[in-house]
Amino acid sequence: MVNQICINLNNAAVDEIKNGNLVSAFRMLSHACQTASKSHKHVDSDGETYRYSWVDCSRSLLPVFRKHPKFSEGSAAFLWLKFLLIETPMGLDSVDDLCPCGYTWVLWFNLGIVSALLGTSVCEAGRMLLDQALRLFDRVEHRLRPEPDSKHWSLLQLAVLNNRVCVLKDLSRDREMLNGLVGIGLACSKSWSKLETMDYDFFHWVADTHLLARTAVAA
């Protein structure tokens, strides 16, 4: 039942995000993460157990943030605002006896974005949420390291790198942010043939914009 609860919470949270209800989504994803962390089983999932699909929430979220007088001070405009749904091709009952570690990285990823949004200067919720977002993205990045070089994992890696840079910017951790921008550039060069043009252009735009802003400040 734990896996069913966590997966349903994740997918319901994405629906809440689409409707602009970030606080509700934050509570759902936090509860899912806490619930999953308390359950550990010795039966792992395989590559066919779960499917993941992207949900683009930028059109519902960005208009809300643009109305805020401090929108230009935060990194909300540069965040990758696509979230992941978890699907079970064999049905939810098929994952009852499996360890949650097969999908917890999705919970971390989605909660990381919500934490970054709520922690940015636009929402003024504080540094604590930005620190949490950074920790969550670091966990996802660590989880991705053994994965094969494919379209799905390459896109996810760039999404994590991109959002991590945004959080570092809001935390004023400039040196780490610069290293992150280099990482985005390297990942784009490595994965350009696997990405959709629109996605590739977005990540390049974020990196170039941040680098130009740093150059202007230095000058």
Image (spheres, rainbow, N blue to C red):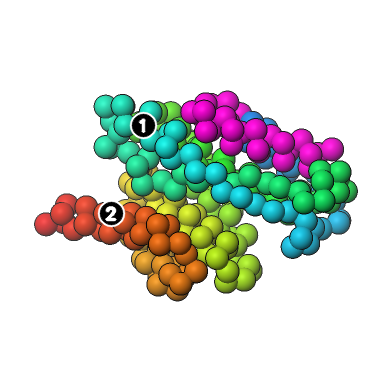
Residue 50, position in %: x, y? 73, 53
Q: Which residues are magenta?
A: 1-27
Answer few, some or many: residues within 10 Å of disc 1's Cα (few below 14, many 20 plus, some between 14 and 19). Answer: few
**Numbered mark located on residue 91 in the image:** none
Residue 136, position in %: x, y? 56, 47
Write the residue at 53% across / 51% down. Answer: 137
Residue 7, position in %: x, y? 72, 40
SS of the residue under disc 1: helix
Write the residue at 68% across / 46% down. Answer: 86
Q: Front-most of 14 and 28? A: 14
Q: Front-most of 42 and 157? A: 157
Residue 23, position in %: x, y? 53, 26
- Looking at marks 1 and 2 on the same chain, the residue that comes earlier in the sequence is marked by 1
- The residue labelled by disc 1 is 63
Answer few, some or many: residues within 10 Å of disc 2's Cα (few below 14, many 20 plus, some between 14 and 19). Answer: some
- The residue labelled by disc 2 is 210
Vertical placement of 124 versus 210: above or below?
above
The amino acid at mark 2 is His
